[in-house]
Image (tube, rainbow, N blue to C red):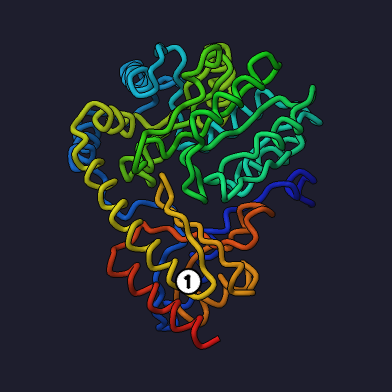
Amino acid sequence: MKLAARMDRILIETAFEVLVKARALEAQGRSVVHLEIGEPDFATPRHVIQAAKDALDGGWTHYGPTQGYPELRQAVADHISTSRGIQVGAERVSIVPGGKPILFFPMMALLEEGDEVIYPNPGFPIYESMIGFLGAKPVPVPLVEKRGFSFDLDVFRSLLNDRTKMVILNSPQNPTGGLIPGEDLTAIADMVRERDLLVLSDEIYSRIHYDDPPVSIASLPGMLDKTIILDGFSKTYAMTGWRLGYGVMPAWLVDAVSKLMVNSNSCTASFTQRAGLAALTGPQTEVEAMVAEFRRRRDAFCDGLNKLPGFRCARPSGAFYAFPNIQGTGISSKDLAEALLQEAGVACLNGASFGAYGEGYLRFSYANSLENLMEALGRMRKFLEKR
């Protein structure tokens, strides 16, 4: 029995591969500083955990509505309306187990074989994976370091055609930490507003920014009904293991997503939705403290990276990733990432694992203690100076 041919088109996340290799080294007694996984190292806020406990005790352990509980959908709609400066209702909200279903389900509902999807490169690997898996054509647009890792708008314009059915945006961005400037979003909106396509705006890091808040393309004139907002609880509330996300989209697409949900997951766990409600409507002090600590780590770690031989690193504007240019080392991204793991005990990711335009870069997650980040810098310096 053979696997279906489409399984050859589905990719994986390198971060989890590197984590397995790092754990294997630790099992041999080696010390490894983990800077590979994109996961906040903070605890889920206490009131959120308590809400989940109360929900379990209160019997929130059964099936719920496929689209999500009305009170959570309304809380999401209120949050999006306030934070993005737009008016959306609960009918536009779909609650799903994690953020990835809002990549997969809308793509599955909208894309035919041969359709084209423009996406950022380097970018979250699952974009390209899902596009190719569905038989559509992935069309990468390179992110430009000198533009703060935003699109080259001339390149973007040249890639648009009648086969383009979706454009994926991600701001703040994984792996670069870049934000798309407001003027670039305006230009992109002007280019796509009259086209027969939808924009999938991945805003999962929307609350983790260090200067001005990111702008959602959905807030620009004429774009609300052309945009799918992907957001969730994993990054903002350190709830990666809870698997709770949501999409905000035109109501007709919510119906299609609900069909796919009921055929795959039935519904999102009821007690986690109660926790999500507490997260959105409760105190935000722990989120604010987490972002402030990420800022402190960003500054110290990026300053340290810039002192390493052959490294150059701009300070990211959001998320919790540093994406240094390592071309000055004369070592490929893959070889340097592997050597840092095996010889220096620092786990990071090869920039090219986020797409071909990531070659010449590494991704480090600074979701680790400042002490461990300084230890990683010291180990990398010793390794590079020996070479």
Q: How many residues crowd mark 1 within 10 Å: few (<14), some (14–19), many (20+)? A: many
Vertical side of 30 occupied by 221: above or below = above
Taking depth in this image into account, of 269 and 138 the one nearest to the observer is 138
Which residue has dot 1 on it? 22
Residue occupying image coordinates x 66% and y 22%: 191
Q: Residue furthest bottom?
A: 386
The image quarter containing residue 95 is top left
Residue occupying image coordinates x 54% and y 24%: 228
Taking depth in this image into account, of 98 and 118 the one nearest to the observer is 118
Q: Is residue 256 left or right of residue 194?
A: left
| Residue 30, x across and y down, in percent | 42, 82
Taking depth in this image into account, of 210 and 146 the one nearest to the observer is 146
Vertical side of 137 occupied by 23: above or below = below
Vertical side of 172 occupied by 3: above or below = below
Look at the image and tell me in which quarter the C terminus lies.
bottom right
| Residue 208, x across and y down, in percent | 36, 41
Say what amino acid the circle numbered 1 marks. Ala
Asked which secondary structure carries label 1, the reply is helix
| Residue 342, x across and y down, in percent | 52, 79
